[in-house]
Amino acid sequence: SMAALRFSRDWLVISSGSKFLAHSCGDKSDNQKPFVYDCSTAVKEPAPEEKGNDGHVNSKGSDRILAFTFSPSGKYFALIDDSKRLVLFRTEPSWECLSVRCLVRRCTSLAITHAEGQILAADKSGDVYSFSILEAEKAGELRLGHLSMLLDVALSPDDKYVLTADRDEKIRVSSLRSPYDIESFCLGHREFVSTILVLPNHPNLLLSGSGDGTLRLWEYKSGREVLCCELTAFLEPESAGSEKKCTVTRITHCTQGDYIAVLCSSLPVVHILQLDSQSLQLTHKQKILLEHRGWDISYAEPSSLWVLQEDKKEAALLYRLSGGQWQCIARPNGEKILRTSVHKRFLCSLFAESVGLESPYDSLYKVTFDNMGDYLRNKEVRLQQRKRKGEQPLASRETKKHCKNSQSSVQC
């Protein structure tokens, strides 16, 4: 997983590799020291089912952080890493690690219920496990099963529904209390569904992004697609014609003004759209061009947009709304304002672990096979090789052989 960032009410968390840094951005930020955690120092004991007959671990992870999230109030913070561990923290009154629990398989996404009683973890085999927050040491319980790899999980604001996005182009809406009760499917994407977001101030609406380069709006309870926005239509001609895939990797929403920021992998651009809640239309407002590929984006209320780009020296950029446009806040000397600038050396080493990493979505695209085309190309290569060697083409040789057989049968 690449470098990422998330905001809660009082904290900004930036992660890269096996570490994350939590920086206070609330009213008491001057008195709060940053909190740093390294997953390589966490408990190494694996789950029993992950051990072989000889007692050794079957597969070792790299301790790299795969996903993390805050609870709605910001009181709790949870992460999953490549070593199949779920780590739970309490952020108030100070950061404290509550538990380290083992997972059955590597997970891809996390969500915490709005009641802050459960953590939902979606894994690569298509399962969703529920972990208790109050009973911080309790093992997870299997809640949902799918036939395809899960890429994201989300919850409705009332905790009634759990929404899952998978590699097979589907979004499933299930009851959280009775997971076997499927409310609907949201179907329409042409590639894997990489990210989903239930809009906080529009609890019946869902935004989804995919490897097909589209952003779609749904009334998820009925599974009805409201609109589809082709993000490739807003790219420059040279970018639109390139071989790079336009995968939507992150969607973030600003409740003030209903602004929506969208980041696509492999492209140094952030799309800003605005939702009209009355007509249910999305308007493309702005295209923020970056100097490097974008890693992650996150809105910080009321009107700040943070962007992480692939540059270990100036990775974090801050944008604010001014005159209807999102403007980068910069000093006269060009240095970007970053509240964590006092930790610049640490952040440089942190971001260095994510520079040059390939997108985890590149391997998820459907592979098409042109068997007839491959056969004809290989046949042409063989014919050319025979011509160079002075041999007769295959068809000609077969014709001569047939003629000889005919003559011999006549003589008999």
Image (cartoon, helix red, strand yellow):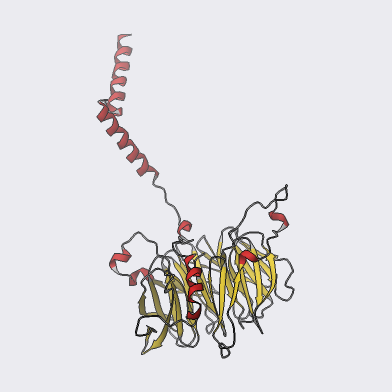
Expressed as whole percent of the image width and height from the top left, the position of residue 313 reads 42, 72
Expressed as whole percent of the image width and height from the top left, the position of residue 295 reads 45, 70
Which residue is painted at 37% across and 73% down in the image? 290
**Outermost top residue:** 412
Q: Can you say which quadrant of the picture contains the C terminus?
A: top left
Expressed as whole percent of the image width and height from the top left, the position of residue 253 reads 48, 80
Which of these two is toward me, 262 or 55? 55
Query: In this view of the protein, can residue 96 be seen by the observer?
Result: yes
Which of these two is toward me, 42 or 51? 42
Which of these two is toward me, 361 or 207? 361
Which residue is painted at 41% across and 48% down in the image? 369
Residue 327 located left or right of residue 196: left
Query: In this view of the protein, can residue 164 be seen by the observer?
Result: no
Q: Is residue 159 above or below residue 212?
A: below
Expressed as whole percent of the image width and height from the top left, the position of residue 5 reads 51, 74
Residue 217 located left or right of residue 243: right
Q: How many marks?
A: 0
Name the quadrant containing residue 375: top left
Residue 297 located left or right of residue 394: right
